[in-house]
Image (spheres, rainbow, N blue to C red):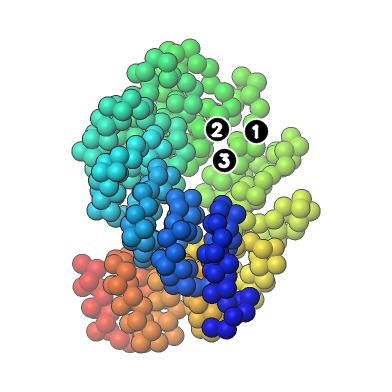
Amino acid sequence: CTRTTSCFLPLSTKFFFRRFNATTQDQFISALKTHSRDEVLDVLKREPSLSSNYLYTKLFRHFRNDMESVEKLVEIMNQHRTIPNIQVCKTLVKLYGQAGDTPKIEELLQQMKEQNIQPDVDFFNALIRYFVHRGDNKMIDRLLKEMKGLGLIPDPIEFDSNGDQNGKVGMINDVNKLIDLQLENGNAVSIEVFHAKINNLGKAQKFEEVEEVLHQMDAHNIKPNITTFNSLIACYGKAEKFKKVDELRRQMKKLGIKPDIHTFGTLIDCYGKAKRVAEVNQTFHQMNAQNIQPNVPILHSMINCFGKAEMFDEIEKIRQYMKTLNSKCDQYTYTTLFNIYGLAKKFDKVDEILHEMQSFGVEINLVGYTALLNCYGKAKRFDDVERIRKEMHVLGFQPNIQTYGSLIDGFGIAGNFDEVDRLLDQMKQHKLKHNVQTYSSLIVGYGRHKMFDKVSEVRNQMK
């Protein structure tokens, strides 16, 4: 390595031989964009003076999609005898939870006890969310007892807002136990707690119990407000109970409660997912009539709806409308556009959208990269597939099961089974289990190339 300004050695030397304060730590973090993971970790490993909870919290978040790097960082922390603070512990428990790594969570809890690190409500909420979704009642009870012993009260409102975004609630009764615990505490009863309970019951589609919550509100002399109705509309709208939604809107009108941007956003999202294009357009016009300007999530819902209906002209109208509002698409909207045009095999449009995204400086997340790999794989543009994979590696993105499914699909259709085998080996190394997508991609790929023995082998694995 020559001693130029682009080389990592002078950059690190500049840091090492002066006091490493918050400003230079941020400079060190920015170096992640131009230097490899191994270079960065090597510098950190060799220089104990860099070790701080502030820096580790930033690095854990940067490597959130790469658990191998997270574990290396933990090793470096232990090597430098850096005692984690509660912020580092909260970041780690969330990462371990996303990875489904219960042993690591148990190990972290034990380490916190040994080092006398006091957990707070946010830390317990993160743990409870994880064990609720795992269906571990014993662990939930243990955590609730620990909280009680520390004088901490579970926060169901925070739990609800950060809960299962896919609506797949496995242990909804345990979530409501937390909410009922708040209701039993006389000074903690608030309308927000009732809203949290409505949201959770709605996810579980327990509509009779939703009505009971409204009676509970009445018993506490709490009147419904716009947020109450928004929660109820979301509850029934997501279940496609649109007659009930219409009834709720009439009740709002009777009570003199005007719909706000969240009401319209919820309605457009629910109608869009139900492919009710006419209602989406009608709601959008009602919104304009009240001089409420749509935000990016609302326009995203409309794009998603029109994409499912293959109404590409309408999508382009929305995109042009966004430009008149000087409103840029976010990474989620761009990812949706990749999926829509990729599914329609409009790959030139995918290139156009990617160029626009890059020109606006919008970063691509793991879901976006997976969508691009899916598009380019179906188009048999494997040079672009390799370019995306290298870019992901440089930025520290660890492929998930959906990413592998997209890659297997593309290489399988092309008949490149050497690469498919390499991908399957990588999945084993990262302990990723097959899902419906990967199995389907393998069956389609092998079937297209008349490798029927392989098809039978995959079907037997599925059993």
Distance CA(mark 3)–CA(mark 2): 7 Å
Q: Residue at x 47, y 72 (%)?
A: 39
Task: Give the residue at mark 3.
Answer: 266
Q: Element at badge 3?
A: helix
Residue 358 in percent (x, y) is at 66, 67
Which of these two is toward me, 449 or 112? 112
The residue carrying pointer 1 sits among few (fewer than 14), some (14 to 19) or many (20 or more) residues within 10 Å by Cα, namely: some
Query: Quick check: marks 3 and 2 in contact, CB under 8 Å?
Result: yes
Q: Which mark is residue 230?
A: 2
Circle nearer the N terminus (3, 2): 2
Residue 132 x/y as whole percent: 31, 41
Disc on the earlier residue, 1 or 3: 1
Q: Quadrant of the C terminus?
A: bottom left
Q: Nearer the viewer, residue 317 or 151?
A: 151
Residue 209 makes an appearance in the image? no
Instruction: Tell me which amino acid carries mark 1.
Output: Asp
Apparent side of residue 157 relative to residue 147 in the rendered image (left or right): right
In the picture of the structure, the residue carrying the numbered disc 1 is 260
Would residue 376 appear left or right of 193 to someone viewing this image? right
Crowding near the residue tagged with mark 2, few <14, some 14–19, many ≥20 C-alpha atoms within 10 Å: many
Q: Quadrant for residue 451, please give it.
A: bottom left
